[in-house]
Image: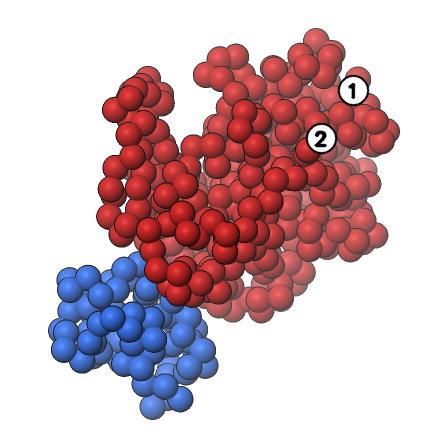
Amino acid sequence: MKSVIEILTEIRPEFDFAASGDFIADGMLDSFDMVTLVSALDKNWGISIQGTDIVPENFQNLQTIEALLRKSGAKP
Amino acid sequence: MNFTFRGKRISGVLVVVPANERSFVEEMRNFNFPEGRSLKLKEVMGYDKRRIVEPGVCVSDLAVFGLQQLFEQNLLKREEIDALLLVTQTADHFMPATSSLIQGRLGLKQDMLCLDINQACAGFVIGLMQAFMLLEQESVRKVVLINADVLSRKASPKDRNIYPMIGDGASITIVERDTVDSVIHASVKMDGSRASALTIPAGGLRLPSSPETARLEDVGDNNLRAKDHVFMDGSAIFNFVQTEVPPLIKDLLVEAGVPVAAVDFFLCHQPNRFMLEKLADKMKVPHARMPNNVVEHFGNSGSVTIPTVMAYNLRERLLREQLQVCLAGFGGGLAWSAMLLKLGKLAFNNITEYE
């Protein structure tokens, strides 16, 4: 199983996600990247993140993404 | 708002798609965007092939082509048509109504009603509702519902937000009275306060087309678009669909007393694969019962996508049997609509190519 940061880096290899506290404000993820990310997270954890949860606030940083995964039923 | 209709049925469906097929992989270099990210988008959204008209082709051309084919194959007679409804957002002219142009080109009788309806992706269900209402009149025995759009002509080839998914096409749906007194349930909702999420800003009287409105502008995310082009706030539309459509369908099924498990297929508008998978998951409907493959073969042709799902995915079954289906459309307006009905056995359920 891949880590969140590995998945993020596959989508946008040009960015250092560990060094950012706000991926959206720093221009590292746009709306299409969020869709690609959700699809990858769904597959990796065998879940389906709810469509209504695909909002920028849930993709600001590693902590918000991990919280979204927990909310969506991902098992660590 | 809920509606109930009795003793009406769809008796045939013909979908007209342009022969001109475009490939996402070939077109992605038009976007100022890394190829790897475009390919990821293709995989998730289902963008692949789509059909768009050649320059100059209008909605009436697609509709006349399809209706002539039905006349030639003896699947429909000119004199049977008591009403011709056209649902489109891309009319041939401001005036006259494109439905009147179609009537004139085909030499249809004068003793009939022609009506244009300006609706987008919710327009198949809304058009059916209008057809059912007309059939309440004794003088109306057969209604031809045409859904048609050529939105590719209003989309910027350099706008990755919308261009890769746009398809053109027309559908011709024959609607008439049923000998069986079956009940059809429908529901529609509208929210004009969110109309700017999906719009063509210029070209009407509010902002007439001019050299200024035709100029491509950098609108962010490496996209170029003019005010003459269609604009879609993708995130707003996505959230609108995920928030509004599941309760609309749920309430409709409750009203009809039909559980989700009793619906054979949910035939939804086809914006992209990802949105439909999320919709199915939210409603706890297996993906196989909510087909999502139209955009990858034909593109998103607005209100034409629901008939395209019928003809592409269920052609044989709908010719030989009756299925309980729930239709759902959602998009510009904003408008969202759903209908629960028994569909089939159809006299025809075909896709044809406009050369």
Chain letter of mark 2 equals B
Q: Colour of chain B?
A: red
Q: Amino acid at mark 1?
A: Arg
Tags 2 and 1 on a common chain: yes
Where disc 2 sits, the SS reads helix
Chain letter of mark 1 equals B
- From this view, report whether residue A30 is shown above or below residue A58: above
Q: Position of residue B107 (x, y in %)?
A: 73, 12
Characterize the local packing of mark 1: few (<14), some (14-19) or many (20 or more) Cα atoms within 10 angstroms.
Answer: some
Q: First in sequence, mark 2 or 1: give its number.
A: 2
Where disc 1 sits, the SS reads helix
Q: Position of residue B143 (x, y in %)?
A: 69, 27
In the image: residue B5, left or right of residue A25: right
Decide if residue B87 is in sight here: no
Q: Residue at x 61, y 15 (%)?
A: B101
The residue tagged 1 is B78
Q: Residue at x 31, y 82 (%)?
A: A6
Q: Based on the displayed image, in which of its 4 quarters is residue B347 positioned?
A: top right
Q: Colour of chain A?
A: blue
Q: Residue at x 48, y 37 (%)?
A: B152
